[in-house]
Amino acid sequence: MGVERNRATWERLGNDDPLWAIMPYPAEKSADWDLDEFMATGVADIDLVVKHLAEHSLRLRGRVLDFGCGVGRLSNAIAALPDVTSVVGVDIASSMVERARQYNRHPGSLEFQAYDGTLLPFADGEFDSVVSLVVVQHAPPLAQLRYLVELNRVLAPGGVLVLQIVTEPRLPQPLPPEALRARFEPLEPPATLRPSESARLTVRLRNESTQTWPAGVQLRLGNHWRRGDEMVVQDDGRADLPHDVPAGGTVDLPLTVTAPPEPGDYQLEFDMVQELITWWSQAGNPVHRVGVNVMGEPMPAPAERPDDATRGVEMHAVPDHLLRDIVQHCGNQVISRVEDHYSDGYWDSYTYLIRAAD
């Protein structure tokens, strides 16, 4: 995904439901976010930053850049700090920036700008402090390199950059090979579908192994689409294992499948996967296939549902060694790295303190 598509994604999110796009907690979905409660999460996050900096006798001070500001959740909290004189929030999405200007609680010292995702529109060393939390990981890899160089470039001598990033996927503990044995029984699978039509079905899954399948290790039911010997859709639906399933036990899983866009006779194939580890068919477990005739007029593109608001948001890790090499190449120094709370459990996430050379 390139910068233009990334910008388009965040423009859409900024127009549709910006608070939930930034803080996608199910309990606060859509208009349920109270603005004061939302902004309070920014205060809590900046309090953690302040505490982390204080452990190294550092502070946010002077002119501060909030990179990837969204609607100003962190920017407003930064502007309230005693040693901060001014704050600039920048974001790739003008829709987010427009909303941030509406939510600006410090108009005398806080401003917001949209930019094109390339070079930051600021002079070398313009900012005494720079903050970027939960931003760079959502950029395309080539853009990430540019952002890291730019954030170091605009940092004043002796200044501090607070940067949160995910560094690598957190692999689940692989199940032993003897546990990867399942039998699939789709209940009333569709015989026909229109091109690109979605159907929700139930698959009864039986644990054919002698091991308990544990929940919480990214075990999922999935499906593929085949046409003859060709796999035309590798990844389609997913259904999480909701609880432990003992040897010999069964569980009924709802699965939404979407037909390929071209008419024809297909095989709808069911398989199990341990994400980031293996498809069970690759370990010798038989898949289950049913024939589906895809015919008729294509389905129109579905209207986006509220719970699809973050669809299209990408995630890319920056390995620790690469980040440190870039910082050093820019003449600066990583002085601290602490594990943080921004990961969804599938990634290693850290907040770095980076100090510019005097």
Image (spheres, grey):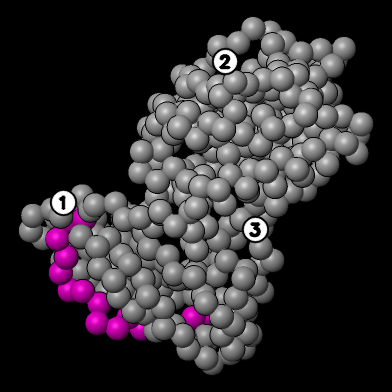
Residue range of the region highlighted in magenta in the rendering: 181-196
Residue 130 sits in which quadrant?
top right
> Distance between the Cα atoms at labels 1 and 2?
40 Å
Q: Is residue 228 above or below residue 38?
A: below
Name the mark on residue 345: 3
| Residue at 70% from the left image edge and 52% from the top image edge | 341
Where residue 82 appears, x then y in whole percent? Answer: 77, 29
Q: Secondary structure beneath disc 1?
A: loop
Name the mark on residue 300: 1
Q: Is residue 83 above or below residue 349?
A: above
Magenta stretch: includes residue 184: yes
Q: What amino acid is labelled 3 in the image?
A: Gly
| Residue situated in front as seen by the camera: 15 or 207 | 15
| Residue at 41% from the left image edge and 78% from the top image edge | 253
Q: What amino acid is labelled 1 in the image?
A: Pro
Q: Is residue 174 left or right of residue 2?
A: right
| Residue situated in front as seen by the camera: 82 or 45 | 82
Q: Secondary structure beneath disc 3?
A: loop
**Residue hosting label 2:** 120
Magenta stretch: includes residue 352: no
Name the mark on residue 136: none
